Structure formats: structure tokens, C-alpha cells
Image: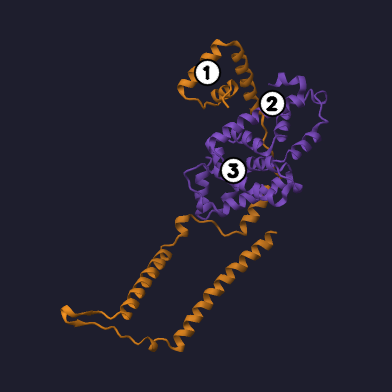
Amino acid sequence: MNTIEQQLWDYIDGNLDEPSKKAIEEKIASDAEIKSQYDDLLKFNLSFEGIDLDEPSMSFTRNVMESVALVPAPVAMKTKVDKKIIYSIGSFFVFSLLALFGYVLYNSNLSMPQFDMNVNFDFNLDQYITPTTVYSFLFADLVIGLIFLDQFLRKKMAQIKKA
Amino acid sequence: MEQKLTDLALIQNVLNGETAQYALLVKRHQRFVFTLALRFSKNREDAEEIAQDCFVKAYRALGTFKQTAKFSTWLYTITYTTAMTFLRKKRLDTSSIHDEGTIIQLENHTSGFSANGYEKQDSHAFLNLAIAQLMPDDAAIITLFYKGEQSLEEIGEALHMESNTIKVKLHRARQRLKEKLQYLLKDEVKELL
């Protein structure tokens, strides 16, 4: 769609590049019909200054601020992403990799006959898996579960309040 | 003389804990957000709810606002998304906002307007009436372009469309607006345009 009207609107809106601008200016100057059409569009374009913006109710700002008061105060993304969290995630992955590496070593029988060296990692893991460690692990799981449940219920409550 | 703080300065203050300053941002943009919401909902009560919801969402997400774009563009994006979600939920009496039936209904509703009865009324009133009768997208684009000081690219960003699509839509919206004005004003349209 590139009718003369479209070109005239592009010219009025300032969307044309220099050559197209000059071309349309020549058309306006040479063709009386196009000139008249251009004047009409210009007049129509000016009438848009009369667009009114509607006013919300008097209590609008107050209502917004009351709703906003229930929401946690916003913080910049930089502040929100605590360095401690990044370090915790990083150390978790490092620890996981080390644990994996240790497990592989434990299960392999590293022997280097050329060096006449026989390395055998023979750990007795059973001594670490005691009822105390199992209970500690389950307790940590329970705490994490409760934190998630708390967050979920808070969100639900907020939704119900909003509704 | 009190110096008017820019949007970005106000946002920074809010993020630094001066949450009461958010009221200044609301006051500054509420008319436009409300008008935009009204363009989509065609109903003052719904528009007020959408606009209010929009400001609350903007407050929640204020920390994620990348200060590379205009705050107004970001806000209008939220308004558009909020309005669409609201209308989808409400489904406007189970018919789409793009449904021709909705437009016909609006046209019938205002068909009682005759040029004679409104001869002496301000031409601006007719223009606003004609805009209100446009399809939501068209009305929003016209409002954003002429009153929101938004470029075609920014409007595209706010309405999730390509800037070229916005350009074509703007052109069509103007044509439709002209037709509406001709319908409303009949012979007097030449005086207005």
C-alpha cells in the first residue's frame, strides 16, 4: 500500500528519507490536486490536537497508593540479586563437582604399574550414614518444604485478598 | 520555584525507599493510562480497574525497569497487556473486542446523534466521540501517536507489533476516523477537516 495519500501522511509524519521527501515536495508543488489533498490532510492532522485525555475518579491516586502499600517495596534488580546468593550457588556447583569427582575416584581402582604405585581409595561410607545424618537430612528437607509452603500460601492469600 | 523531577529520578527515589514518591508518578501518568484503558474497555469502571491494576503491576516490577527506554512506553506496554488480560477474562459479553458486532453495536448506539443537534458543539467533542467509536487498536494507536508523544517504534513496542504494522494501522485508523466524522457531522465535516 503506497498510495499518494499514504505518501502524504508519511511526509506529514516525517517518516520519509531525503530523496522521497524531495519527490513528494515536487509533486505537491506541481500538482494542484495533490496540493489540495495535502492541505486537507494537514488540516485534519491539526485537528488531532483536540484529542482529550479522560480523567479517572478523584480517588484514583489514593486507591493506587493503598493497593501499593500492601505490596513489598520495589528494589533495584542489582540490590535484589544478592552476591551471597551467587556465591552460594557457585559453591554448591563446585562442591557437587568435587563430590562427583571423589565418588569416581572412590569407585575406580587407580593403579599405575609403570610407577609401581597402587592407589586404592577404600573409604567406608557406611560409617557416615548414621541415623543422625539421615534425620538431619530429612529435617533440612522439611524446613525447605515449609518455606515453599509458606510462600505458596502467602501468594494464595494475596490473590484471594485481591479478588 | 520547585523543580519538577523527571520520571527516572522519581523511580530512583522509589527504589531507594521513598515509596510515597510513586504517587507523583501515578498523578503524572494516570490520565493517559486511564484514557488508553478506556480505549480498550469502552467502559469507565473497567478502565479504572485496568489503570489501577496497571500501576500496581508497574510498582511491583519497578526494579526490573531498564532505564534505557522511556518510562511511559514501558507503562503503556503494561497497560496494553493488562487491558488484554482483563478483557480476555471478561470477554466483553462473550464477544471479541475485534468483533464487528461490537462496533456495529457502538454505531447503533450513537446513531441518534445528528449534526443538527450538535451544530454548536465544539469540534473537539466530535473528534473524541469518533475516536471512542473506533476499534480499540485504532483508537489506542491514534491516542499514543498524537497524545502520548510516542514514535511508531515505541507504539510497536507497547502494542507488541512491528513499527511498519503500526504505520499501516495508523493510516487506516485515520481513514476510519475520517469516515466516522463524516457519519457524525455529515456536511459540517468539511469545516472541521
- The residue that label 1 is drawn on is A24
**Visible residue check, residue B58:** yes
- The image quarter containing residue A81 is bottom left
The disc placed on residue A142 is none
| Chain identifier of the orange chain | A
Q: Secondary structure at mark 1?
A: helix
Judged left or right of residue B113, residue A132 is left
Three-letter code, disc 2:
Lys
- The residue that label 2 is drawn on is B178
Q: Secondary structure at mark 2?
A: helix
Task: Kindly report the distance in space between the C-alpha atoms of the residues bearing marks 2 and 1.
Answer: 23 Å
Furthest residue in direction left, as rendered: A115
**A85 and A41: which is toward the camera:** A41
* Residue at 43%, 65% in the rendered image: A85
Compare marks 2 and 3 and give the one earlier in the sequence.
Answer: 3
Q: Is B150 rendered above or below residue B175? A: below
Percent across and percent down for residue B69 are 49, 42
**Visible residue check, residue B24:** no
